[in-house]
Image (tube, helix red, strand yellow):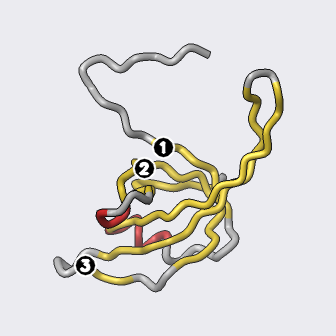
C-alpha cells in the first residue's frame, strides 16, 4: 500500500493494540492534572517483503486528565486499542506514547 502524503501538515498519530503490562499509581501534575504512567506490550504477526514476521514490542506510555482517570481503573493484562502521539520521554532518546483515547480491542 503506497504511503499517502498529508498536505501542509506533519502527522504524528499512533494506533496500537496492546495490553497493559504495568501501571503506576495515578498521580497529579503540579497543575493538578491527573497523570498515569503505564507500560504497554504489543504482539502481532505482520507481513514484510512477502514474509510473515512476529512482532513483540514494549512501549512506555502516559495519559493525562479524564483519560488517565479512566485508564487507572483498567486491569493489568487487559487489552485495548490505544490512540495517541509519540514524544521523547522526559528529555531522553526513549520514545513514549501519549495516550489520547483508548477503547476495547
Q: Disc 2 versus disc 1: distance between alpha carbons?
A: 5 Å
Q: Nearer the viewer, residue 52 or 31?
A: 52
Is residue 9 depicted above or below 37 in this figure?
Answer: above
Mark 2 or mark 1: whose residue is earlier in sequence: 1
Is residue 102 depicted above or below 55 in this figure?
Answer: below
Mark 3 or mark 2: whose residue is earlier in sequence: 3
| Residue at image coords 66%, 63% | 19
Q: Nearer the viewer, residue 71 or 94?
A: 94
Callout 2: 10 Å neighbours few (<14), some, many (20+)?
Answer: many
At numbered mark 1, what does the secondary structure look like: helix, strand or loop?
A: strand
Which residue is the site of mark 3?
29
Circles 2 and 1, Cβ within 8 Å, touching? The answer is yes
At numbered mark 2, what does the secondary structure look like: helix, strand or loop?
A: strand
| Residue at image coords 61%, 61% | 58
Mark number displayed over residue 84: 2
Mark number displayed over residue 14: 1
Amino acid at each position: 500500500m503506497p504511503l499517502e502524503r498529508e498536505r501542509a501538515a506533519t502527522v504524528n498519530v499512533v494506533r496500537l493494540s496492546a495490553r497493559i503490562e504495568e501501571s503506576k499509581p495515578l498521580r497529579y501534575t503540579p497543575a493538578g492534572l491527573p497523570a498515569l504512567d503505564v507500560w504497554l506490550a504489543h504482539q502481532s504477526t505482520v507481513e514484510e517483503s512477502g514474509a510473515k514476521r512476529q512482532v513483540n514490542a514494549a512501549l512506555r506510555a502516559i495519559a493525562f486528565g479524564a483519560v488517565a482517570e479512566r485508564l487507572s481503573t483498567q486491569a493489568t493484562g487487559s487489552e485495548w486499542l490505544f490512540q495517541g502521539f509519540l514524544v521523547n520521554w522526559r528529555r531522553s532518546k526513549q520514545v513514549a506514547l501519549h495516550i489520547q483515547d483508548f477503547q476495547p480491542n
